[in-house]
Amino acid sequence: MSGRKKLILDLDTGIDDALALAYALGSPEVELVGIIASYGNVTLHRAERNARAVLEALGHPEVPVFRGADRALSAEGEFAPSEAVLRIHGSNGLGEQDFCAAADGWCYSAPRDGMAFLARSVDAYGDDLLYVPTGPLTNLAMALVREPRLARALPCVTFMGGALAVPGNVTPCAEANIHNDPEAADVALSLGLRLRMIGLDVTHQAILTRSDTASWRELGTEAGRLYADMTDHYIGTYEQNNPHMGGCALHDPLAVAAAIDPSLVECLRTNLRVDLSGATRGRTVCDPRRLRDAEKNHEVALAVDVPRFLRLFRERVGRALAS
Ligand code: BDR
Ligand code: CA
């Protein structure tokens, strides 16, 4: 199909990142032109390996994977995922499923600079570019600091992260992607870039159940089986930690869906920032100094058409897993 938007995913692959990747590959309106790997749910090396392995399993080994940041802007030591994250996403980030052992060797191929790839893509595709980070915002902040012109040149960036009117999921105030690098998120939010926030306000409404994963198993494909087993691992951790939700939250797929079709969500226009100190560190808030500014750079999703999103999710992920 011609006239498709060019999509870059910035993933800390992670189970729901892998679901977002399948959603993207099953979406006819976009061409996935590259993935930038990030630390977050896993280390950077593991994220790069997982992205390649999932692409292979979904029949798209041609999509390039670029290397992003391996730690938060202010971090001194190497990043290591917490015990809680290792339980939620599994020790390999993919619910202990062996997507593609061959990807292990690729992980250490020549490094390809993800931030330079993002800048090149802005020049090449202009307004046709969709850039969707679903991990910490470190890669975006580094790209903006390196090339400030990107703040004006990048079309609206839809990201998964934050929590405005609901509690966080790591601390009472902080959502995981913002918690991993509050300084980077604050840089991204303070430089005039247009951003659409798909945070816990909406992602905790979009729930996947075991009946969906059972239907993937029935496809009879290797990808369907891997995704079903991987996602059942994720649902299992929600059954333990958040039994009232009745399944797992589709955080990252909702960000991709809203980037492709913003009419899925209803947003508050505002100017955000991130609390950087004290007990509320990592909290996304409306910037009290900019509440009356006429210019609003940010849209925060507060409502989502759940039935329509789930219909799209089933169609698109089902398509990606079918062969
Ligand atoms: C976000 O944190 C990560 O663990 C998930 O992949 C998602 O991007 C949810 O808070
Ligand atoms: Ca993620």
Image (cartoon, helix red, strand yellow):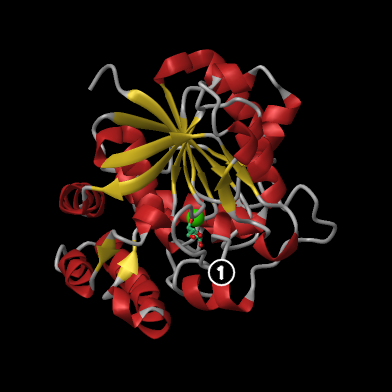
Count of numbered circles in the view: 1
Q: Is mark 1 within 8 Å of ligand 1?
A: no
Q: Quadrant of residue 78?
A: bottom right
**In this orientation, which residue lies closer to the viewer: 168 or 323?**
168
Q: Residue furthest right?
A: 76
Does any portion of residue 232 appear in the rendered image?
A: yes
Residue that carries the numbered disc 1 in the rendered image: 172
Q: Could you say where residue 211 lies in the image, as x and y percent from the top left?
A: 17, 72
**Residue 97 placement, left or right of 218:** right
- Name the image quarter holding residue 222: bottom left
The N terminus, quarter of image: top left
Name the residue: 40% across, 85% down: 240
Q: Who is closer to the viewer here, 39 or 84?
A: 84
- Residue at 73% x, 61% y: name it: 79
Q: Amino acid at mark 1?
A: Pro
Q: Residue 273: image x %, image y %?
A: 62, 42
Residue 20 image offset from top left, x and y in percent = 37, 50
Counting from the top left corner in percent of width and height, residue 84 is at: 57, 77
Above/below status of 271 relative to 167: above
Secondary structure of the residue carrying tag 1 is loop
| Residue 56 visible in the picture | no
67 vs 258, left or right, is right
Q: Is residue 317 left or right of residue 80?
A: left
Q: Is residue 134 above or below residue 64?
A: below
View extreme (front): residue? 292
The residue sitting at 30% across, 22% down in the picture is 4
The residue that appears at 55% across and 14% down in the rendered structure is 123
Q: Is residue 181 above or below residue 88?
A: above
Query: Mark 1, residues whose alpha carbon is within 10 Å: few (<14), some, or many (≥20)?
Result: few
